Image (cartoon, helix red, strand yellow):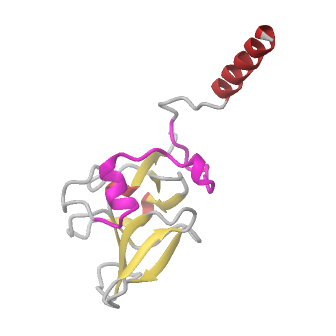
Amino acid sequence: MKIFNCIICCMVVFLSACGQKAANMPATATSKKSNPMEWNKLTPEEARVIVNKGTEYPGTGDLLKNTQKGTYICKRCNAPLYNSDSKFDSHCGWPSFDDEIKGAVKRISDSDGMRTEIVCANCDAHLGHVFLGEGLTQKNTRHCVNSISMLFVQDKK
């Protein structure tokens, strides 16, 4: 019986180790994780914004001044959200985009009817808000996105 229990314990350890991911696995712009068990672990501050629909302080986000070519992906599930070509400087304090990757972002009216929330279409992570009619770009659209809600994957050179 002791040998049987030992074999079972070894199998459990072996199988659970095979299922673990590397802690520093790089994000890719092509992976989508629609299963909540596969979502990236969030820090308390990330969860405050992404899960609880908070907002980061203006001008503080890591991606605000990013001008590199690449893809902005969801911090929670790695779904591609925005291409760098659609990013522009709106001087609002948060990264701004005038277009999303087709099908990547859902729009939801805020309960007060004043604004329109944007969330990841794959995992419903809160991204920020979308504003129309400001005349800042030819598309006349501004996705005002929290940096903390995204990761950036630079194009390969």
Q: Quadrant of residue 8?
A: top right
**Drawn side of residue 152 relative to residue 92, left or right:** right
Residue 150 in the figure: left or right of residue 78:
left
* Quadrant of res 54: bottom left
Q: Is residue 46 magenta?
A: yes
Residue at the far top in the pictured view: 3
Seen from the viewer's position, the closer of residues 23 and 65 is 23
Is 93 drawn above or below residue 27 in the view shown?
below
Q: Is residue 109 above or below residue 11?
A: below
The quadrant of the picture occupied by the N terminus is: top right
Residue 19, x across and y down, in percent: 66, 31
| Above or below 24: residue 37 | below
Q: Which residues are magenta?
A: 26-54
- Asked if residue 14 is among those painted magenta in the image, a careful observer would answer no
Which residue: 59% across, 48% down?
Answer: 37
Q: Give the total of numbered labels.
A: 0
Residue occupying the point 35% across, 75% down: 129
Relative to 154, does residue 135 appear above or below in the rendering? Answer: below
Q: Looking at this view, name the residue that lies furthest to the front.
A: 1
Residue at the image point whose x is 58% and y is 53% from the top:
36
Q: Nearer the viewer, residue 4 or 73?
A: 4
Magenta part mainly helix, strand or loop?
Answer: loop
> Residue 84 in the image: x percent, y percent?
43, 58
Residue 30 x, y percent position in the rendering = 61, 50
Report x, y in % for residue 69: 43, 51
Q: Is residue 154 left or right of residue 114?
A: right
**Quick one: 80 or 112, which is closer to the camera?**
112
Please tell me which residue is depicted at 61% across the width and 49% down the height of the picture: 31
Residue 79 or residue 71, whichever sits in front: 79
Q: Left or right: where does residue 66 sit relative to residue 8?
A: left
